[in-house]
Image (spheres, rainbow, N blue to C red):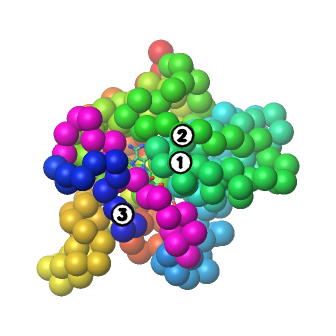
Amino acid sequence: MPHRHAGRAHDHHSSDDPGALIRWPRRYDLLVGVALAGRGRRLRGYLADVLGVDPGDRVLDVGCGTGTLALVLAGRAGPQGSVTGVDASEEMVAAARAKARGKNVPVEFRVAPAQELPFADDSFDAVVTSLMIHHLPEADRLPAVREQLRVLHPGGRLLIAEFQAPEGPIGSKVTGHLFGHAMADNNLDEVAALTSAAGALDVGRHPSGVGWLGLVTGTKPAA
Ligand SMILES: C[S@@+](CC[C@H](N)C(=O)[O-])C[C@H]1O[C@@H](n2cnc3c(N)ncnc32)[C@H](O)[C@@H]1O
């Protein structure tokens, strides 16, 4: 998704750079609605299937945005489970909390950076991150995936859903023009390589049913 650089005026990548936060939740939800063109509900259910969320699971959504996926996952995890969504954007977390209000599902949202998750090792049965990795400075992407594996229980499942840039120079140019180079240059093979390099096992790629979204799965090695 298109993004605005957060926090700092510069645009270079450095380790103290938080990444490109989104600060306009309402517009974001509208944009996602248009991009998914009625396929959102089915896609999120499918992501829950691929992640393998069962009743009682503890699930983390990193870069949860306005919380739409986290709420679906919370419905699957049920009253014995829990879903935690984190995002470094206060505006997105506020919107996610508002969306969850009055819904009887076990979900909570916190402001936290993907680079330093505020959770103990082995805290979750499953971790998902959707359209977030390409928002990070390149130097932070591998450490962020390591961080996701750190908080996973041994044997726990990781799902990374990422933008799949259109192939060919024209698609790439149009994407770059509309959404910036982070999206135009996003490469699912690199995301899969990153996931292996971070230490995940059984790394695999899957279609999502939505042309511009690819899925990478892996598991945390058993202790
Ligand atoms: C394209 S949105 C994806 C939101 C949601 N996961 C979805 O699939 O619709 C990317 C999200 O990542 C968040 N983000 C960017 N950098 C981050 C960071 N360093 N730590 C946590 N969240 C971050 C943004 O604020 C934004 O909400």
Q: Which residue is mark 1?
A: 90
By secondary structure, the bulk of the magenta-drawn segment is best described as loop
Asked if 111 appears above or below 160 in the picture, the reply is above
Distance of mark 2 from mark 3, alpha carbons?
18 Å
Residue at (44% x, 33% y) in the render: 148
Crowding near the residue tagged with mark 1, few <14, some 14–19, many ≥20 C-alpha atoms within 10 Å: some
Front-most of residues 12 and 38: 12
Residue 132 in the magenta stretch? The answer is no
Q: For the residues labelled 2 and 1, say whether their Cβ atoms are less than 8 Å apart.
A: yes
The magenta segment is 13-30
Say whether residue 177 is visible: yes
Left/right of residue 21 with respect to residue 168 in the rendered view: right
Residue 165 position, x and y percent, is 29, 70
Question: For disc 3, does the CB lie below 8 Å from ligand 1?
Answer: yes
Distance of mark 2 from mark 1, alpha carbons?
6 Å
Residue 14 in the magenta stretch? The answer is yes
Residue 14 position, x and y percent, is 19, 39
- Could you tell me the amino acid type at mark 2? Val
Mark 1 element type: helix
* Occupied quadrant, residue 39: bottom right
